[in-house]
Amino acid sequence: MYKKSIDLIAVYPGSFDPPTRGHIDIINRASKIFPRVVVAVTCNYNKKHMFSLEERVSMMKEALFKVNNVKVESFSGLLVNYLDNIKSFCIIRGLRALSDFEYEFQLALMNRKLKEDVETVFLMPDREHTFLSSSMVREIAFLGGNFKNFVPKNIYKKIIKKISKENKSV
């Protein structure tokens, strides 16, 4: 079992495709609670990603450059193995609505089954972000809707550029 420490690293894993204001809100909240936060960007093999892993890491770094105790990096494989590699045991997960809870609860229990000292901390975003998801942002963007207030400015520009590039190639 890990000991309490000022060196505690909390890990916020996700595909962040694209990162939303809801993600940024959860990261900012976590950064006020934990001495160190790692945003661990990964590939979800069940999804077709809009942005490459490198692009998502870069966007997150740009969006979080002012938050001193947050580091952004990528990983692959099992989250519990990644936690071992960086000497962490704490996972941050966001809960937007009650509908998220069942899935997140199962995920937390599975992670604990894989590695018994893993703890999952659930954080709720500000209520103005509770409806946000990356998949909704992608859909609104591809259908030509206004999604400007759902993502940071740098990410908005990258989504517009990506969509216009994809529309030209069709």
Image (cartoon, helix red, strand yellow):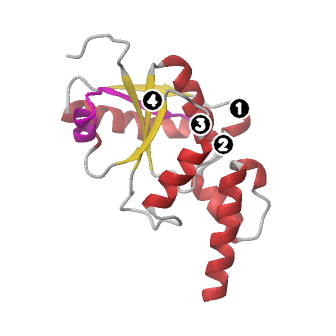
In whole angstroms, how far apart are the C-alphas of marks 1 and 4? 22 Å
Q: Quadrant of the N terminus?
A: top left
- Helix, strand, or loop for circle 1? helix
Mark nearest the camera among 2 and 3 is 2
First in sequence: mark 4 vs mark 2:
2
In this view, 87 is above or below 135: above
- Residue 159 spot, x, y in % from top left: 65, 64
Residue at image coords 38%, 13%: 6
Mark nearest the camera among 4 and 2 is 4
Pointers 4 and 2 in contact (CB under 8 A)?
A: no
Few, some or many residues within 10 Å of mark 4 (<14, 14–19, 20+): many
What numbered label is drawn on residue 127? 1
- Helix, strand, or loop for circle 3? loop
Q: Which residue is mark 2?
A: 21
Amino acid type of the residue that numbered disc 2 sits on in the rendered structure: Arg
Q: Which residue extends farthest top?
A: 4
Q: Which portion, as a residue range, is magenta?
A: 80-97
**Which image quarter: residue 4?**
top left
Residue at image coords 54%, 34%: 95
Q: Which residue is mark 3?
A: 96
Q: Which residue is mark 4?
A: 37
- Helix, strand, or loop for circle 2? helix
